[in-house]
Amino acid sequence: MTGAAALAPAAPLTSAVVLYGDRSVTLDKIQPDPKKSADTLWVRSADLPRINDFQIKPEGGRADMCIPVSKGWKRGEYFNLSAFAKKLGQSVVVDSESRVWSFGEIPAIRGGFLN
């Protein structure tokens, strides 16, 4: 690469885009995974309602279903959305170079809709 493109700074490592359902949420602040895993996404708990309608409460997550939250998924104001998705059986596709995470439907919600 030469010229201006080679000199242009990359997007900050603290940003990401999350795709979920019909939503595309740009997060201006994420936290790198302490284990240096490029496919693990730590988001601010306050951003969860914008991403997937979940809220972290003492009894778990989300208004219409309660999902237990492991203590290891929370670190200060941050929440491990990747671990949460894995617990729910939610499919995840990651483009770590572009910092885009795409989350599929939550099977428990889809199953409730189909029944």
Image: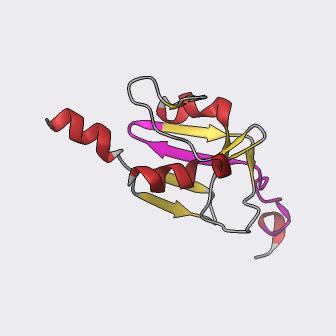
> In the shown orientation, is residue 43 left or right of residue 5?
left
Q: Which residue shows up at 46% across the image and 56% down it? A: 86
Image quarter in which the C terminus is found: top left
Residue 76, image x, y percentages = 78, 40
Q: Is residue 93 magenta?
A: no
Q: Is residue 21 above or below residue 95?
A: above
x, y percent for residue 48: 58, 34
Report which quarter residue 109 is drawn in: top left
Residue bounds of the magenta highlight: 6-23
Of 113 and 10, the residue lying toward us: 113
Per the image, is 20 magenta?
yes
Q: Residue at position x 79%, y 53% from top?
A: 12
Q: Which residue lies most toward the right here?
A: 7
Residue lying furthest bottom: 1
Q: Quadrant of the N terminus?
A: bottom right
Image position, residue 4 (x, y; %)? 82, 63
